[in-house]
Image (cartoon, rainbow, N blue to C red):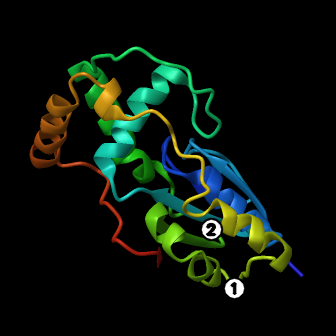
Amino acid sequence: MEQFQYLVSSPVRVGSHYVIQLLGSSGVRCQKTHDPRLVVDYAHTYLIMLYRLDRFGTLMSHAIWTRTRESNEYTNQDPSPFVVSRTEFDNIFVHNMTYHSKHDLSLPWAGIYRTNFEDVLADNAAFLQQFGLKINPMAKEIWNSLVPGGMEKSPYRYERLVINHEQCREWFEENLKNTRMLFNPPQHQSSHL
């Protein structure tokens, strides 16, 4: 029987560590990456391109992460409020909005999937079913304790930390309107390419 692995690829602050836990609970080999150029055994690897529906929140979370360097274990440090410069915002925007376009989809992947984190949380069984997987019954209780109330969410709120978050929202809307990005945002449901 061929052994396949699952590669969850996403820009930072999207929830890939939870998707890895879910996939791992079914007993498959999986890993995450924030580098779309990672070289793997393509023919035996399912590529899962993960994103969040709340794009603006993802960008603000990314800006906070650049200061705290905390993404799934939190020390509850008390970072000082800060201002995001236009240059920093634009760099984070471009990184997040073009990230998945950097994957070479012409490679012989075992399968390519696009999905958003919110759909995975809403119905983790359906997420696994698209790969013919099920949650290991022994791990199901652990996974269910993580979703959604038991998940350790970031204690850092951009409304409190990013002094100019309203201006960042304006920049976000302006960038969406004025830029023809290479990345075509996936539809709001899991899809196999």
Identify whether 128 is placed above or below 183: below
Q: Nearer the viewer, residue 93 or 154?
A: 154
Identify whether 15 is placed above or below 143: above
Can see residue 60?
yes
Residue at position x 34%, y 33% in the image: 158
Q: Quadrant of the N terminus?
A: bottom right
Q: Nearer the viewer, residue 141 or 128?
A: 141
Question: Which of the 4 image quadrants contains residue 116?
Answer: bottom left
Residue at position x 46%, y 17% in the image: 79
Q: Nearer the viewer, residue 41 or 124?
A: 124
Q: Nearer the viewer, residue 141 or 61?
A: 141
SS of the residue at dot 2?
loop
Q: Earlier in the sequence, mark 2 or mark 1?
A: 2
Q: Is residue 73 left or right of residue 99?
A: right
The residue indicated by pointer 1 is 132
Q: Position of residue 4 (x, y in %)?
A: 78, 70
Say what amino acid the circle numbered 2 marks. Answer: Pro
The residue indicated by pointer 2 is 108
Q: Is residue 166 left or right of residue 20?
A: left
Say what amino acid the circle numbered 1 marks. Answer: Gly
In this rendering, the label closer to the viewer, 2 or 1: 1
Q: CA distance from mark 2 to mark 1?
A: 20 Å
Can see residue 107?
no
SS of the residue at dot 1?
loop
Kindly indicate whether the residue at mark 1 contacts the one at mark 2 (C-beta within 8 angstroms).
no
Q: Is residue 136 left or right of residue 121?
A: right
Q: Is residue 98 left or right of residue 103?
A: left
Q: Residues within 10 Å of mark 2 (few under 14, many from 20)?
A: few
Q: Position of residue 99 (x, y in %)?
A: 42, 46
